[in-house]
Image (cartoon, rainbow, N blue to C red):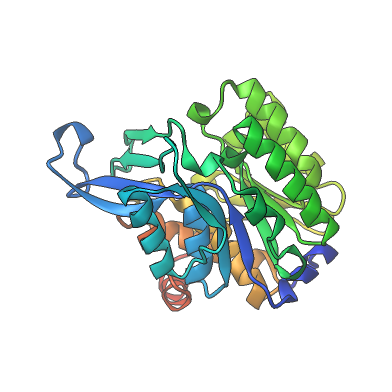
């Protein structure tokens, strides 16, 4: 069944690409997979960070995409920039900081159960955004702009990005927010809730998991689902993810549950980024919410069953092959 898309997604026919806002960094994984950080002697490297991963997912899905971020002027920043470029992500709006700011670094275990993750984000470079880059973004011709919640965690970046979201609204460029709640990125959960809830005033599509929606609601998982339903009461859309339980889509035109592709996971990281990038990428080709979410679910399943994050993002052909060969549903 082809479901009605809201009028604000008419922008998907624009000639421009997507814009993704937020962090990109270096990930290190102990090798071989299953090795604990504390006993590791070798590591493999990859690009990570929600915005970087979403941008790569879109590029691998065949979409034009620009990243709005900042990288430190050092070897780590060079690594991230070079790899993003090789994945097909545009770097026109990626600045290079010259102060003490540093590109994010994450060390993550490739374990399915209770993996340890250590993230270094002191003086994170991605929170220092170039104002001239922001004002020159091609909002009028872009398909959509995707914000990641952590990008709003500093006062300066929050002010800049609230104005950017308002400008996007004025140019009928859909605003998508991946809640992307990371406790260590915020002074308190209350501040995260306040900042992200206020930002939702500009948002057309809100994406998060059950725990993230609960955080926004200030209550339980049940309260979080109520928050998602209320958000979608007008012409907006909420994608409510529940891990292995699948995803609910809520809007004025559709309320439906979509299952998952069952795989044996190697790790839990990167699934949400693969999901959102491929949902939006698929909507460009086929304006069908359910099929787009199934494409996102397939990409998420592929990523959690592979080492790495950005490098694990599937291209369009491998995604189609996976869907044809893998059982859908629990």
In this picture, is 291 found above or below 68? below
Quadrant position of the N terminus in the picture? bottom right
- 76 left or right of 225 in image: left
Q: Can you give x and y, in whole percent of width and height, for residue 112 in the image?
A: 32, 43
- The residue at the point 56 percent across, 27 percent down is 186
In this picture, is 39 found above or below 274? above
- The residue at the point 77 percent across, 34 percent down is 198
Q: Can you give x and y, in whole percent of width and height, for residue 76 in the image?
A: 33, 49
Q: Can you give x and y, in whole percent of width and height, for residue 265 in the image?
A: 35, 51
In this picture, is 295 found above or below 166? below
For the question of whether residue 77 can be seen, the reply is yes
Q: Quadrant of residue 19?
A: bottom right
Q: Quadrant of residue 109?
A: top left
- The residue at the point 17 percent across, 49 percent down is 32
Q: Residue furthest right?
A: 234
Q: Can you give x and y, in whole percent of width and height, for residue 216 in the image?
A: 68, 31
- 94 left or right of 228 in image: left
Viewer-proximal residue among 264 and 150: 150
Q: Residue furthest left?
A: 41
- 46 left or right of 85 in image: left
Q: Quadrant of residue 192?
A: top right
- The residue at the point 79 percent across, 70 percent down is 10
**What is the count of numbered marks?**
0
For the question of whether residue 226 can be seen, the reply is no
């Amino acid at each position: 069944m082809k479901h009605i898309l809201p009028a604000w997604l008419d922008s998907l026919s624009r000639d421009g690409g997507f814009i993704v806002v937020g962090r990109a960094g270096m990930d290190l994984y102990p090798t071989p997979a299953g090795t604990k950080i504390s006993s590791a002697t070798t590591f493999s490297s990859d690009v990570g960070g929600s915005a970087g991963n979403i941008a790569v997912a879109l590029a691998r899905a065949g979409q034009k995409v620009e990243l709005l971020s900042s990288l430190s002027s050092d070897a780590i920043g060079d690594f991230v920039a070079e790899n993003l470029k090789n994945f097909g992500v545009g770097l026109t709006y990626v600045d290079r900081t010259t102060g003490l700011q540093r590109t994010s670094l994450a060390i993550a275990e490739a374990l399915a159960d209770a993996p340890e993750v250590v993230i270094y984000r002191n003086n994170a470079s991605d929170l220092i955004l170039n104002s001239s880059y922001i004002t020159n973004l091609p909002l009028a011709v872009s398909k959509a702009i995707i914000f990641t919640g952590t990008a709003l965690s500093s006062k300066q970046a929050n002010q800049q990005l609230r104005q950017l979201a308002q400008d996007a609204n004025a140019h009928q460029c859909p605003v998508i927010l991946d809640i992307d709640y990371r406790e260590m990125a915020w002074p308190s959960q209350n501040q995260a809730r306040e900042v992200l809830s206020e930002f939702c005033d500009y948002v057309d599509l809100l994406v998060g998991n059950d725990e993230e929606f609960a955080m926004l609601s200030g209550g339980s998982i049940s309260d979080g689902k109520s928050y998602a339903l209320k958000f979608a009461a007008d012409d907006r859309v909420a994608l409510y993810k529940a891990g292995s339980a699948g995803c609910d889509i809520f809007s004025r035109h559709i309320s439906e549950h979509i299952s998952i592709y069952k795989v044996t996971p190697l790790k839990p990281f990167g699934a949400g980024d693969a999901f959102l990038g491929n949902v939006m990428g698929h909507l460009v080709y086929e304006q069908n919410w359910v099929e787009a979410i199934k494409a996102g679910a397939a990409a998420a399943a592929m990523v959690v069953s592979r080492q790495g994050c950005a490098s694990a993002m599937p291209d369009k052909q491998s995604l189609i092959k996976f869907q044809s060969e893998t059982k859908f549903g629990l």
